[in-house]
Amino acid sequence: TEIGMIMLSLTAVQRAKKVTKHALEVLSACNLQNYDAFFRLYSSAPNMSGYIMDFLLTRQRCAAWRMMVKAYSPTLPLSFVQFTLAFSDESSCEEFVESVRGGLRPPEEG
């Protein structure tokens, strides 16, 4: 509610600024659960906005991971996860996947 009030109080000049536009797009991506947009915005964050977005990163990655597993199981290449969830390197992506995988493994046959 507070963010909505702040948005309503912005002038046209303030809304036109690159950083403000970016912040509003991030807010929209979070509200709409548009993870693709969120991670594209994270990768192109102006100034030091990326550091602010870091606070949202784990939560957004976990939510996006759950959707990806539902959509792409049983095959989900690590390179795709790394690119989609904006990991800078394969090892940090692998660490994330191992940490969230616990309850998402397919049952073993037999």
Image (cartoon, rainbow, N blue to C red):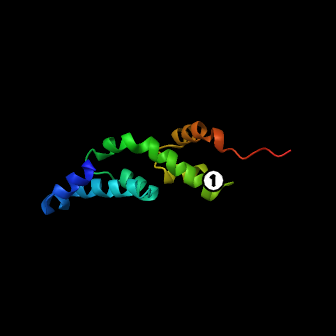
Q: Name the side, left or right, on which 97 lies relative to 46.
A: right
Viewer-nearest residue: 94 or 58: 58
Viewer-nearest residue: 2 or 32: 2
Q: Name the side, left or right, on which 63 lies relative to 43.
A: right
Which residue shows up at 13% across the image and 59% down it? 11
- Residue 18: x %, y % from top left: 22, 57
- Which residue matches tag 1? 76
Crowding around mark 1 (Cα neighbors within 10 Å: few <14, some 14 to 19, many 20+) is few
Viewer-nearest residue: 38 or 77: 38
Against 99, residue 76 (above or below) is: below
Quarter residue 29 falls in: bottom left
- Residue 91: x %, y % from top left: 54, 39
Report the residue that reaches farthest toward the right: 110
Q: Amino acid at mark 1?
A: Leu
Quarter of the C terminus within the rendering: top right
Q: Name the side, left or right, on which 76 lies relative to 107.
A: left
Against 102, residue 10 (above or below) is: below
Which residue shows up at 58% across the image and 40% down it? 100
Against 65, residue 92 (above or below) is: above
Q: Secondary structure at mark 1?
A: loop
